[in-house]
Image: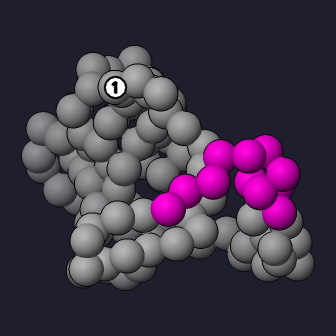
Amino acid sequence: VKEDQILACVIIGVQPETYQVELDHRSSSIAKAENINPADKAAKKKTKVLFVRRNITHPHFQNVSRTKAMALLQAMNRGEFIIRPSSAGMNKLTVTRKVFDNVCSEVQ
């Protein structure tokens, strides 16, 4: 393991008093975690939430979906971001930021 490396892991324990998280990176554990509720995954795919286009004038705002924002960020540098409409409601926006290559974070 080295700095800036991306790992796929499953959280198996949390110790909030010492700010520690116990992780498991075995492929069998990851496969189990991904298959916990296959019915929920199917239901999420069927219910697609659309965002409402906004008339906002800001250099970082774009009327795009989460998928499109992540695709646009692939061509950008680390730390760059896009402000976009949130599917949570008309009074909310989401900031999608590029953390690493193929890794984005979102804040509402």
Of 56 and 19, the residue lying toward us: 19
- The residue at 36%/26% (across/down) is 4
Label 1: few (<14), some (14–19) or many (≥20) C-alpha neighbours in 10 Å: few
- Colour pattern: one colour
User: Does residue 43 show up?
Assistant: no
Label 1 element class: loop
Q: In this rendering, would 25 be left or right of 61?
A: right
- The residue at 28%/62% (across/down) is 107
Q: Is residue 28 magenta?
A: yes
- Stretch of the chain drawn in magenta: 22-32
Q: Is residue 12 magenta?
A: no
- The residue at 18%/41% (across/down) is 60
Q: Position of residue 93 (x, y in %)?
A: 27, 66
As drawn, 37 above or below 81: below
Q: Position of residue 55 (x, y in %)?
A: 23, 59
Q: Position of residue 32 (x, y in %)?
A: 83, 63
Q: For the C terminus, which image quadrant?
A: bottom left
As drawn, 95 above or below 80: below
Picture quarter containing residue 43?
Answer: bottom right
Q: Position of residue 71 (x, y in %)?
A: 50, 32
Of 51 and 21, the residue lying toward us: 21
| Count of marks, rendered view | 1
Q: At label 1, which amino acid type do we have?
A: Glu
Picture quarter containing residue 77?
Answer: top left
As drawn, 90 above or below 61: below
User: Does residue 15 show up?
Assistant: yes
Task: Find disc 1 in the rendering and name its residue.
Answer: 3
- The residue at 42%/64% (across/down) is 21
- Extreme residue toward the left, this view: 58
